[in-house]
Amino acid sequence: MAAHNLAVILKNPQNDTEFLLTEQTPPAKFGEEEYDSYVDSDLWDLPSTQLNSLEAESESGIVFEAVELCPPKINLKKFDFELALNRVLGHAGLGAGDAGEWRFWKYVEEPEFGPGLPLNTIFIMGKLVSADQNLPEQCKWMSIWSCQTLLLDVKPNNSRIGLLVVVGLISDSMQSTTWKVPSTLQYQEYPPGVVLVPLHSRTAKPFHTTNLIIFARENVSDECEGSGFVTCGDALIVDPGCHPQSSGELKKIISALPRKLVVFVTHHHGDHVDGLSIIQKCNPDATLLAHENTMRRIGKDDWSLGYTSVSGSEQICIGGQTLRVIFAPGHTDGHVGLLHVKTHSLIVGDHCVGQGSAVLDSTSGGNMSDYFQSTYRFMELSPHVLIPMHGRVNMWPKHMLCGYLKNRRSREASILKAIENGAQTLFEIVADVYSNVDRSFWIPAASNVRLHMDHLAQQDKLPKVILFMA
């Protein structure tokens, strides 16, 4: 089962190398200047919309060329293309008669990021009939070359290119010459050169997978120039946290990657490091990078070889690509992120997740004050995309991070309100603040409430006499 999306590649009748992009609508504002002052740069992508399925085959007059390229399991007649195309073209100020023949281009299945159904995309290609169309300002023509420039020569706050352009048009022409993802595995490459492979792991609901992130040298001639790197390699993987049942998938990946491998872990939780022992066996020459607080909690059964300690600001070179370590405590006291400099993509570990928010680990130095500071540190970087270890990539980084800040502050306001209403024990506060949440989540919620109260106490906002009782 999957939901479906329609993406349209509409060529410029005056320049066959250009196609239509539309400015994507950002998420709704928060209505508070403190958060709305942080604005993500413009995002441009292929025009797209939800593609509804039909119970019976459609008798629409829309005919596609090259339908033989469509996978047999997909029946194009069982989708409402007429409604979807009218919606897409209307957004660009066009009508159904403004486009000529349509051609099936590609069917892309989204990996199992979760939660919820994967969102698979049907790409179709067409061309405007007339060259005299005046496009609205939220539309423009761009070439693959100009898109690649924005993707791979990133300047903070410049316009950004979205996921559909990459998976629909660019990825096939930019496949790495030095390694390929094993054909049995589902993966996503966005931005170019940043590969995500969700592997089943022992993570907490609602997720079931941890994103293994892979960087590999782009060409056999790529080398690290200059000094100042904490380590260099031909490939790097982030957070090999696969479930033992998925160990075969990880072995295939390690076997396909170059031997000069760097392994980076954001923190020590099992759903991020369970695969370390497999890497150690498959490639004992691999270099492990981690914060010292993380390594103190990783067992010898997982990794018994040496490691290189990182604490933030170190640079790593992978086949000519530079990545910078970002110290980001909060989730744990050894939590670190990683910035891919060329694409300005920020790997955030468990600081953010694809849906909801991560619980801070108070048993491993989790700290709410640190979490707030790390969130602001991430925003100051102005990343073009956030890559969590659970869930989909997020195309609106500043908005997502501000949402986390707002949610945490709202939670603290609720805690203070509960205390004002007479709650005195931890249980009473949790019961009040999380009254609309399933009780099975109250235990981890209690840990977060304790951390919030520590943060409130640091700000002298907490009443002096609060009794914590079991």
Image (spheres, grey):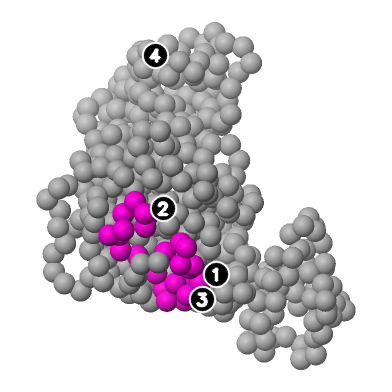
Q: Is residue 31 left or right of residue 143?
A: right
Neighbour class for label 3 at 10 Å: few (<14), some, many (≥20)? many
Residue 67: assigned label: 4
First to last magenta residue range: 278-303
Helix, strand or loop status at disc 2: helix
Disc nearer the start of the sequence (3/4):
4
Q: In the rendered view, would you say 204 is above or below 470?
A: above
Disc count in the image?
A: 4
Q: Amino acid at mark 2?
A: Ile
Label 3, label 2: how far apart the Cα atoms are: 26 Å
Q: Is residue 141 visible?
A: no
Q: CA distance from mark 3 to mark 4?
A: 54 Å
What residue is pinned by disc 3? 333
Whether residues under marks 1 and 4 lie with C-beta atoms below 8 angstroms apart, the answer is: no
Which-is-in-front pick, marks 1 and 2? 2
The secondary structure type at the circle numbered 3 is: loop
Three-letter code for the amino acid on which mark 1 is drawn = His
Residue 29 coordinates in the image, percent (x, y): 56, 58
Q: Quadrant of residue 8?
A: top left
Residue in front for this viewpoint, 364 or 116: 364
Q: Which residue is mark 1?
A: 331
Residue 278 badge: 2
Query: Mark 1 packing: few (<14 Cα in 10 Å), some, or many (20+)?
Result: many
Element carrying mark 4: helix
Question: Which corner quadrant holds the C terminus?
Answer: bottom right
Looking at the rendered structure, the secondary structure element under dot 1 is: loop
